[in-house]
Image (tube, rainbow, N blue to C red):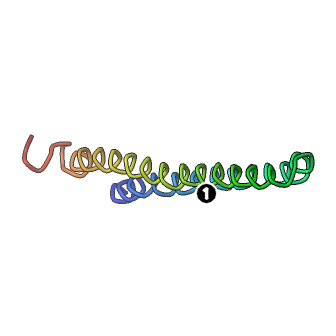
Amino acid sequence: MKEVVFIVSCLLPFFFFFFLRFVIGGCFFFFNFCRILFFEFFCLAQHKKHHRFFIIIIIIIVHHLQFFTVTVTFPFVLFCFCLGGMSIVVTYFPLWTSPGGKTYTGE
C-alpha cells in the first residue's frame, strides 16, 4: 500500500498539470477563435483595407504571445511542482517504509 502511495504521489502532479495545461490551452484557443471572428466580421468591416492588414497582424502576434505563454510557462511550473513533490517524497518515503518510523540510517 505504501508503494501505491509513493507512485501516486509521484505521478499525480504530472496528470494534474497536463490536464490543467490542456484545459487552459483549450480556453485560450476558444477565446482567440471567437476574438478573431469578432474582429473579422464586425470591426474589420469598418476599416480601410490597409488598416485591416495591420489589425490582422496584431491579432496573430497577440495569439502567438498567448500560445508561447501557455506552452513555455506551464511546463516550467510543472517541473517546479514535480521537483518539489519529488523532494518531499524522497525525504519522507523512508519514514513511511522503515520499521518504527525511523530512517534506514537509524536517525
Image coordinates of residue 25 in percent, x first then y, are: 63, 54
Residue at the top extreme of this rendering = 107
Q: Which residue is mark 1?
A: 22
Instruction: Classify the position of the C terminus by image quarter.
Output: top left
What x and y, as percent, mark residue 80?
37, 47
Q: Residue at x 52, y 56 (%)?
A: 71
Q: Residue at x 58, y 50 (%)?
A: 65
Label 1, secondary structure: give it.
Answer: helix
Q: Position of residue 73 (x, y in %)?
A: 48, 48
Quarter of the N terminus within the rendering: bottom left
Q: Quadrant of residue 8?
A: bottom left
Q: Nearer the viewer, residue 107 or 18?
A: 18
From the viewer's perspective, is 41 left or right of 69?
right
Q: How dense is the environment of label 1, judged by Cα within 10 Å: few (below 14), some, or many (20 and up)?
A: few
Q: In the depicted view, which residue is nearer to us: 23 or 105?
A: 23
Number of numbered tags placed on the structure image: 1
- Nearest the camera: 75 or 66? 66
Q: Residue at x 57, y 53 (%)?
A: 21
Q: Residue at x 70, y 54 (%)?
A: 57
Q: Is residue 6 left or right of residue 106?
A: right
For the residue pair 81 and 37, the one nearer the viewer reads as 37
Question: In the rendered view, does 30 fall on the left or right side of 2?
Answer: right
- Disc 1 marks a residue whose amino acid type is Phe
Image x and y of residue 29, in percent: 70, 55
